[in-house]
Amino acid sequence: MLASALRAAGHAVVAASAVSQDSRDRIDALLPGVPVLEVPQVVERAELVLLTVPDDVLPGLVAGIAETGGWQAGQIVIHTAGRYGTQVLEPAQRAGAIPVALHPAMTFTGTSIDLSRLVGCPFAVTAPAPVLPIGQALVVEIGGEPVVLPEAARPLYHAALAHGANHLVTLVAQAMRSLQQAGIEEPGAYLTPLLTAALDGTLRDGELALTGPVLRGDAGTVAEHLERLAELAGQDATFVDLPPTYRALARATTQRAWAGGRFADSTARALLDAIDPPADTPGVPDTAPTATPDLPAAPADHPGRAPQPTDPPDPQTDPASPVLVRTRAELRSALGRQHGTRAVVMTMGALHEGHLDLVREARRRADHVVVTIFVNPLQFGAGEDLDAYPRDLEADLAKVAAAGADIVFAPDRQTVYPDGEPAVRIDPGPVATRLEGATRPTHFAGVLTVVHKLLHLTRPDVALFGQKDAQQLALVRSMVRDLDLDVEVVAVPIRREPDGLAMSSRNAYLDAPQRQAALALSAALTAGAERVTDGAAAVLRAAREHLAAAPGIRLDYLELVDPETMEPVQFGQGGPALLAVAAWVGSTRLIDNVILDLQEDE
Ligand code: AMP
């Protein structure tokens, strides 16, 4: 499009390069008659080279052309990536080329409509001082308004534009979809006058243009909005991003209005409490030193307020929040944006610190972390808790954000099994008939089938599994070995509550007496482990005795097995052994285990 504008201004466009079919079509439409050539040939023929590639591709492209000696002395090289100045063109500059960075503050459609949008459009121009006039002149030629921007200011400049323009799209689209849910048939038409007035007002008066419940201090209204949005997100997962966005913007709006002296501390406090009810904000100390512990510092000229501590890090507004992807196409495109190594953590959601240990370990082991959240129907037997299994995607997102996930893949059943139940499955072999498999005969075929699928969909270098599900871990390891899957399997130790109970999403089913009764599982394992120096028989006896005396639990199995084959260890045998237990507490089935290093009996 810029090339087309330069052509209209009288420059000859000698050639263009395109990789995708879309780019070829655009060249056909906007630059008719211009030959499409490979990059080196375009660079060889042109006195002025325009690089309009994605930001992340630019450094490699410039360096690649330099490596093959493509840049020529005196050649003008322009890129249009917002976040970069001319430093990125240094390899071209070293070969004598003239570097210029241009960035139009405009959004483009890729069609000829764009040409008219260039007229009067502000362009940031960054270039070494002697060649700045070249960049400015080019902008003027195509009808734009050049604005000189220093190299160091480019990232902030670009962040500001992206935040304003791109996030506005998300915000307005969220409002349109919500209105549709409220029964407004043409939300776009309905919103136009309101949003136009708000935009005009803000561009003219800044934050003074604010109206609405936050400015009026209507904490009750804000709380009700959040309640309704949470309800909507609960009914329809495609709205799951709405409550955190509303909350983040309501918080920022409150803080900005307070800092601008628009209302009293107590009003700000009431609003912030409605936005983040205090019980849910563990980062804020109970004995707050001031009445407004999480308000930002007021500007120095704002009377009567001492500087306040800054907010604790907030996963919901943290820029490192993960991308939520729900379809295969979204996942593919999110993965395509990652470079470097990748770790995957597979979960069924309702996340707790045990899951987050996996995410944190993943963070340490790879450049990128993908967390999958999918309650896999294939691994639930008839009469099991598939429908009742706890689900809370919004809370899960906030938790994995804090633990460092980059992508959360939360597909629905249809996405994972588009043709219904798969006809071809992984046969987990004899290990799957023992322990858990004796009670849940189809469980591990379902687990390994979904693990295999998710490994293929996410293509990780490392996959992390919890020791909590020791038999699952052993089976995943043997699947990877037996089927030559190219992934490293890493085990993560069991995370327990302070009283010893192994963390599990199913603990949420337990009432207070059951929660107390459930402690018998970990206590029995500890009783067994204490006898490890006395050999296998003593370990089993101690654990059994403990369970026999425990009220409120129904034992499924307690076994001391080989951690790979899950076969019972022979009495007298030494080496690593897994002491594993499963029991019912009420209608909840819990499992736990501990790895022991057995002493050989004489
Ligand atoms: P789930 O969501 O229960 O399927 O668990 C997902 C992953 O988290 C599995 O690899 C589990 O073994 C692991 N996991 C679950 N609970 C714990 C825990 N208490 N400690 C460590 N890992 C766990």
Image: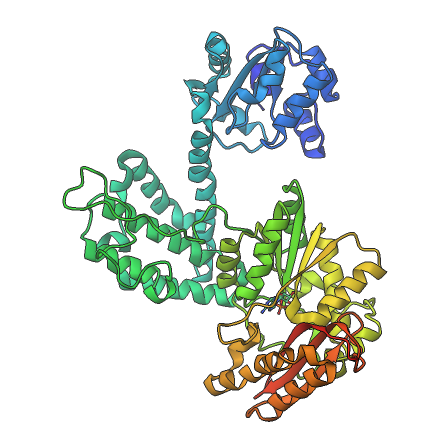
Question: Which quadrant contains ligand 1?
Answer: bottom right
- Picture quadrant of residue 507: bottom right
Asked if 440 appears above or below 467 in the picture, the reply is below
| Residue 384 x, y percent position in the rendering | 65, 81
Give the residue at x 43% y 26%.
153
Q: Quadrant of the N terminus?
A: top right
- Whether residue 269 appears in this view of the structure is yes
Asked if 459 appears above or below 571 in the picture, the reply is above
Side (left or right) of 128 relative to 436: left
Q: How is the rendered protein coloured?
A: rainbow
- Give the farthest residue toward the front: 602
Side (left or right) of 213 relative to 54: left
| Residue 436 x, y percent position in the rendering | 72, 79
How many numbered marks does the figure carry? Answer: 0
- Whether residue 179 appears in this view of the structure is no
Q: Quadrant of the C terminus?
A: bottom right
| Residue 488 x, y percent position in the rendering | 73, 54
Side (left or right) of 168 relative to 95: left
Asked if 444 appears above or below 539 in the picture, the reply is above
| Residue 107 x, y percent position in the rendering | 50, 33
Pick the residue in front: 343 or 226.
343
Give the residue at x 62% y 92%.
548
Give the residue at x 42% y 48%.
189
Give the residue at x 42% y 35%.
160
Pick the residue in front: 185 or 48.
48
